[in-house]
Image (cartoon, helix red, strand yellow):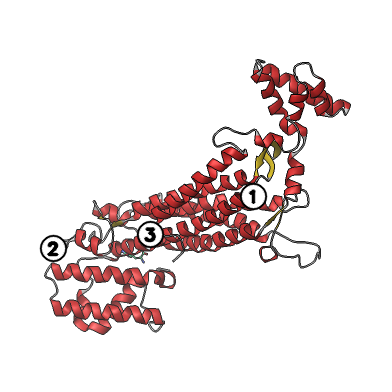
């Protein structure tokens, strides 16, 4: 039950890096001499290659990655090996390893998110003047450019990147030197080991250093919210690819047929990205429940932090490129989108605003146009005709409801029309560059 080697083997690289830094610390503290340091470092090098080659196999006494590495170092370096664990505990060790692992994972997830944003932004760029209905309550509300719709998802995903980077920054603190919970009587130098491991800072409080798993909870939250965004995008794709909407056709590589019904083409990638979000949320809430009852400092419950973290990172790194591929290869059906957006009712607000510009208070304008829409529906007279005949409106107002016109009139900053969207897309490109610089990587390592 207490064994965790089958999954914490993923921390091998970090555990060995932490041990190398600790050897440096032991040397500086005068606990080992230069020859002993060399022999420990040589043993650690060998353990690293044995793990990479798969020749170091965990036995029944190897509980976790820390005991496995130490056992093998002791076999290789003899008595000197027995000095490696001086002044440290698995408690500061595991926290150090997991922080390093998490920082790398956050970078990878952020880079994969940026790749998806780039796909959406380039599809937005290529969408030109294509428009579709914008919805509220899933009821057609006002036409919006397709580019505007796609860019909306980009901004949400860039906030995710922002969060991942901020979480990485908070994770960037070395717990090494906190020992079991209280530090050490030996002349260890946590500042120096932190620097050697590439951390920006060392812990301020040894109890907090070994008990804190905020960084895991944060990573899980960031990924869960990112997953929720992908889920919403997936749900939209499911809708858009239905016969009823017909806004989009998926590439065969991102859809599957039915095993029974020959005519079916199912949006499985979209559905899985929606489905996976449940699991990502579960990983987050599971860990929070694990953490909530823990007194200071380390408790073995904390070993339950790794599996949800590893799983969420694995899942999101599978979903992100799949969603990117789905969007990159989807074929839009502008004629369907535009036909759905072209009803004259969708331009009712423009007719009301026509009146407002000529001095009618908005509430009155709203009532006048609402009356015309109702009349058109009950009598079957086209709305354009009623607008044209109305004393306060006329042909100029009737022209506003012509297909394709309403979307061009969304001119305010951040709005859904062509001029505003052109500005927005330029800003989006700048924001992507800022995100790339913050992540420090554009592509997944
Ligand atoms: N495998 C343990 C974990 O993941 C390492 C720390 C064990 N510490 C202890 N005092 N038993 O948390």
The residue beneath circle 3 is 103
- Give the quarter of the figure containing the C terminus: bottom left
For marks 1 and 3, give the CA distance.
36 Å
- For the residue pair 162 and 5, the one nearer the viewer reads as 162
Q: What element carries label 3?
A: helix
The residue beneath circle 2 is 187
Dot in front, 1 or 3 = 1
For marks 2 and 3, give the CA distance.
28 Å
Q: Is mark 1 on a helix, strand or loop?
A: loop
For marks 2 and 1, give the CA distance.
64 Å
- For the residue pair 289 and 270, the one nearer the viewer reads as 270
For disc 2, does the CB lie below 8 Å from ligand 1?
no
Decide: is 46 above or below 105: below
Q: Residues within 10 Å of mark 3 (few under 14, many from 20)?
A: many
Residue at the spot 30% in from the left edge and 52% down from the top edge? 296
Dot in front, 2 or 3 = 3
């Amino acid at each position: 039950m207490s064994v965790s080697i089958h999954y914490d083997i993923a921390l091998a690289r970090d555990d060995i890096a932490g041990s190398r830094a600790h050897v440096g610390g032991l040397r500086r503290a005068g606990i080992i001499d230069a020859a002993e340091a060399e022999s420990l470092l040589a043993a650690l090098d060998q353990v690293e290659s044995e793990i990479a080659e798969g020749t170091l196999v965990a036995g029944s006494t190897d509980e976790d990655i820390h005991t496995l590495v130490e056992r093998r170092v002791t076999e290789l370096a003899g008595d000197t090996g027995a000095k490696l664990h001086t002044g440290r505990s698995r408690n500061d060790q595991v926290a150090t390893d997991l922080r390093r692992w998490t920082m790398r994972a956050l970078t990878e997830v952020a880079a994969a998110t940026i790749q998806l944003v780039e796909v959406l932004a380039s599809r937005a760029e290529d969408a030109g003047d294509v428009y579709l209905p914008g919805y509220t309550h899933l009821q057609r509300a006002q036409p919006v450019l397709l580019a505007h719709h796609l860019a909306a998802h980009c901004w949400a995903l860039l906030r995710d990147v922002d969060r991942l980077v901020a979480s990485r920054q908070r994770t960037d603190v070395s717990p090494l030197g906190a020992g079991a919970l209280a530090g050490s009587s030996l002349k260890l130098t946590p500042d120096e080991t932190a620097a050697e491991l590439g951390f920006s800072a060392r812990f301020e409080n040894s109890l907090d250093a070994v008990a804190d798993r905020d960084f895991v909870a944060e990573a899980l939250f960031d990924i869960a919210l990112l997953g929720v965004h992908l889920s919403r995008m997936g749900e939209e794709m499911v809708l858009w690819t239905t016969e009823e909407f017909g806004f989009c056709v998926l590439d065969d590589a991102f859809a599957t047929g039915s095993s029974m019904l020959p005519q079916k083409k199912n949006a499985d990638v979209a559905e899985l990205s929606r489905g996976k979000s449940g699991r990502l949320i579960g990983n987050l809430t599971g860990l929070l429940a694990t953490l909530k009852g823990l007194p200071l400092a380390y408790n073995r419950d904390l070993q339950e932090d790794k599996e949800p973290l590893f799983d969420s990172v694995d899942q999101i790194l599978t979903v992100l490129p799949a969603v990117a591929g789905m969007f990159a290869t989807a074929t839009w059906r502008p004629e369907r989108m535009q036909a759905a957006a072209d009803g004259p009712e969708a331009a009712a607000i423009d007719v009301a605003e026509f009146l407002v510009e000529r001095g009618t208070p908005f509430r009155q304008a709203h009532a006048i146009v609402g009356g015309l829409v109702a009349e058109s529906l009950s009598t079957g007279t086209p709305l354009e005709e009623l607008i044209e005949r109305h004393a306060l409106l006329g042909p100029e107002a009737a022209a506003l409801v012509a297909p394709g016109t309403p979307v061009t009139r969304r001119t305010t900053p951040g709005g859904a029309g062509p001029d505003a969207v052109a500005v927005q897309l330029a800003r989006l490109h700048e924001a992507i560059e800022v995100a790339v610089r913050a992540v420090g990587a554009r592509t997944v390592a």
